[in-house]
Image: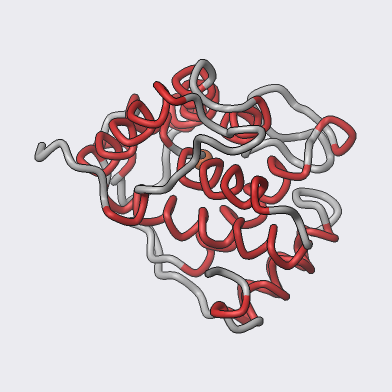
Amino acid sequence: MNGAAPAQVRLTLVGQPRPCVTSAGSSVVERLTALLGEHDPSTLHHSIRVAHLVVAMAANQGLPAREHSAAFLAGLLHDVGKISIPTALLDKPTALTEEEAGVLRDHAAAGGWMVGPFVSSDVAHAVRHHHERFDGRGYPAGLGAADLPWMTRAVAVADTYDALVSQRPYREGCCTSQAFRELDRVAGSQLDGELVDLLIRAVTTPAASLVA
Ligand SMILES: [Fe+2]
C-alpha cells in the first residue's frame, strides 16, 4: 500500500457552517478510501463515479454547497464496508450462494459502523442504508420511503445507475438508454421515482454546468 488517497478524493469537507466530516475524521476518510482502493480498486472507482453523480443530482436539485460536500462524501463512502468482505467474494464471476449474498449484504451496516463516528448523520445514514428500497423491502433495516432522507435515496439511485452501466465480474455494463429504462422500471418500488428523474436530468445535462 502506498498510503496515499487518490487525488480525486482530496476535498475540503471541514470548516463549513455544518461540516459533513469532523476535522479528525477527514484523515480517517482518506485512509478508508485508500484502503478500499487497495482492497478492491473497481469499488473505489465505482464509488468516485457515484460521488460525482450524487453531487450532480444535488446541484440539479438546487441544494446549497454544504449539501454538495455531503453528497460527495456519501457517494464516496457508500461501499466502504466492502473492505470487510473477502475479495474472492467481491470478484466472484458466478452467482452468489444465499450464504455468500448474506455476507455481501453485511457491507452496508459495516460501512455505517466504520464511518459513523467521523461523518455527519446524513452521510452515515446514506452509507448504512443505501441498499434500502422505497417499498421497504431492502436492507439492512427494511426502511421505507418515509424513513429515507434525500441523501440516502439519492445514493441508492446513483449506485443503481452506475452498477447498470459498469462492467461487473459476472456481466457487461449496459448502455445509458437501457439503464434509464431499467431505472424507470423500478421507480416507485426499489427507487424514488422523483430522484430517478433527477438522476436522468443530471446525467443528460452537460457536467461542466453542474460540477465545478
Ligand atoms: Fe453497496
Does 132 sit above or below residue 167?
Answer: above
Residue 15 location (% of width, % of height): 53, 35
Q: Quadrant of residue 99?
A: top left
Residue 99 shows up from this direction:
no
| Quadrant housing the N terminus | top left
Q: Residue at x 65, y 29 (%)?
A: 125
Residue 110 location (% of width, % of height): 47, 21
Towards the viewer: 9 or 181: 9
Q: Residue at x 66, y 25 (%)?
A: 121
How is the rendered protein coloured?
secondary structure
Does 70 sit above or below residue 103?
Answer: below
Towards the viewer: 141 or 15: 15
Q: Residue at x 56, y 41 (%)?
A: 74
Does 64 sit above or below residue 137?
Answer: below
Q: Is 53 left or right of 3, judged from the image as shown? A: right
Q: Is 185 left or right of 174, judged from the image as shown? A: right
How many numbered badges does the structure rendering display?
Answer: 0
Q: Can you name the residue that lies furthest to the right here?
A: 146
Towards the viewer: 59 or 148: 59
Residue 146 shows up from this direction:
yes
Q: Residue at x 62, y 72 (%)?
A: 210
Q: Quadrant of residue 100?
A: top left
Q: Is 211 left or right of 24, judged from the image as shown? A: right
Residue 202 location (% of width, % of height): 67, 72
Residue 76 location (% of width, % of height): 46, 45
